[in-house]
Each structure stands twice: as structure tokens, then as C-alpha cells.
Amino acid sequence: MIPGNCIFNKLLSRHFFNYFKTKFITLSINLSIDLSMHLELSKPFEQQWKNKDPFIEAEKLQGEVFRALEARKTLRFTFLGKSYFIKIHRGVGWFEIIENLIRFRLPVLGAANEYLAIKKLETLQIDTMTIAGYGSKGINPARQQSFIITDDLVNTISLEDFCIDWKTKAPDFDLKSYLIEKLAYISRTLHQNGINHRDYYICHFLMDISHGDIKMTENLKISLIDLHRAQLRKQTPERWLIKDIASLYFSAMDIGLKRRDFYRFMKFYHQCSLRDCLTKHGRFWNRVELQGQKLWYRKQRKGDAI
């Protein structure tokens, strides 16, 4: 028997490297992925960055850093008195691309993923971030440089923070029901239109609190964020649907929801009776529960590093 590390080394040999490299470039062409220059800027950035290299200007931005890795940086900054977020991608390298392809996953090359996902959500009338700038350049997918600037969603609170006291202080019934049905609607709309999020937790739903009275459910706006790993297809495979819903289930396990609350979500997600949910879709929900529990136990062992 060949040791596992020998197999992995063999896969990373020059022959396999060139094979997967060629396959990925061919796949990119077949999927009509634009790896050349693409630039969109809202008026403030277009005016201030006129006759300047936008990629250099993006790197110059200073603010509160939320993530700083070799290949990606996320920060919040102020530009002409308005708050924004920027995600800068500097190229993932061939190793990560090939590693993802070996695992039968399309790699996230840069900001294009989030850009396309936001555009798709806009067509579906799902509230999300507003794009203020997007840039991408480079033929080589491993070295592609890109950035995406979005308006800061001010006067919002994540559902994770909003629901933190629900376990000890019961929420308003109508408000809770509305939020459950709203998340079921968003989930159903995404999944029926070939989108899966891949980081589908309640912390990535931001609720607008600018109106003050959050009990007025008809005015509540819920925005879905952090779309950089989202996948877009004609039809989403069931395993990815399960992963999304299991992640959402896991993230809501400890906020004091009752079994009937989960049943409410199931009914609105499938748009059918509870009986049909448990008979026609029983296998689906069993797998959701199993995977959600696995995430929960993993968190108990590893903390937030899930």
C-alpha cells in the first residue's frame, strides 16, 4: 500500500500540476469566466480616482481591519464622509486552486464570486449589500487581483446579536414568527434559483434598526451578507442545500427556539404542510439535523474554529 503522503506528493508532481492547470483554464473558458480587466466604480470613487490606478488606490485605503491574510484583506473605511467595506484579493496561487479541484470544488479566485452573487440577489429582490466599486484584472487565475467595495450597512444588528437574549427573555411572538418565515423565504428563494451560501449562519443576516421600533415587522429589512464563497448554478445539488440549512440550524440551536419554531421554518421553506415535510421531505430534514448536530459538537471541541 502506498502511504497517503506519497499519493499526495504524486498528485502535486509536475504532470498533475500541469494537468489540473490546463483543466482549470479550459473550465474557465467553458464557463465564460472573464479573467481580463473589469472595472466598475460609483461616482465618488470614479471622480476621486480619475487618472489613477484603482488597484493601487484600493491598497492605499486605511481603516478598521477585520481580516488580513496574505491573499485577502477586509477592512472598513471612510471615504468622503461615508462608511464602506472593501475586500481585496491578491491571487490565491496554483496550489490552492489545484487542492480545491482535487476535492472537486471550484476555487474562489477573488471578488468576482461576491460581485456576481450580489447581482443575482438584486434580481431576486433579496436585500443584500450595495456595490460601490468592483475591479478585477489578470489573465492568470492564480494571480488575479481584484477588489469589491460595498456600502457599510449602518444602523443594523446581526440576528445572532439580536437573538442572544431569547433563551432567557422570550421574544415577541409575532416578531419571532416573522423572522423565521423571512429566513425560510430567503433560503427557499436562494436555493430555488441555484444559489448556495456556504457560510449560512444567522450572524450573516443583518436587520435594519433605523426605524427604531423593531416590532413593526412590515418595515423590517433583513440583508444577507458575506457572499464571497457563494456558489451560483442553474440548479443547486441537494448536498449543498443541506449544508446551508444545517449551518443555519446549527447557528440557531442555542437561542431558545422551540421545536415548533423549527417546524414553522420547515413548512415555509418547502411551502407545504408539516405532514408533507415529514413524509415527502423527511430524509432531507434528518440529514439537516444530523449535520447541524455535528457542527454543534465540533464547536464544543474546537470553539469558534469550525
Image (spheres, rainbow, N blue to C red):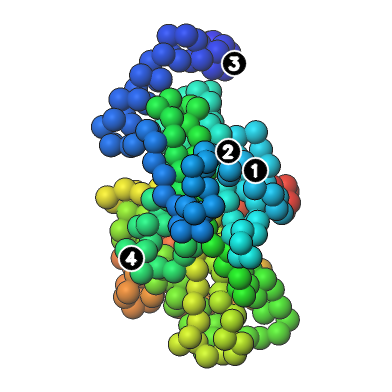
Please tell me the numbered disc located at residue 5: 3
Image point 67% across, 79% down: which residue? Answer: 166
Mark 1 and mark 3 in contact? Answer it, CB < 8 Å. Answer: no
- Amino acid marked by disc 2: Ile
The image position of residue 203, as x and y in percent, is 60, 63
Mark 4 and mark 2 in contact? Answer it, CB < 8 Å. Answer: no
Q: Which residue is mark 2?
A: 56
Query: Which of 89 and 192 lies nearest the eye of the viewer?
Result: 89
Q: Which residue is mark 4?
A: 124
Q: CA distance from mark 4 to mark 2?
A: 34 Å
Image point 52% across, 38% down: which residue? Answer: 53
Please tell me the numbered disc located at residue 60: 1
* Secondary structure under the numbered disc 1 in the rendered image: helix
- Amino acid marked by disc 4: Leu
Q: CA distance from mark 3 to mark 2?
A: 41 Å
- Which of the two labelled residues, at mark 4 and mark 3, occupies the earlier sequence position? 3
- Amino acid marked by disc 1: Lys
Mark 2 and mark 1 in contact? Answer it, CB < 8 Å. Answer: yes
Please tell me the numbered disc located at residue 170: none
Q: Residues within 10 Å of mark 3 (few under 14, many from 20)?
A: few
- Which of the two labelled residues, at mark 1 and mark 3, occupies the earlier sequence position? 3
209 w.r.t. 269: above or below: below
72 w.r.t. 41: above or below: above
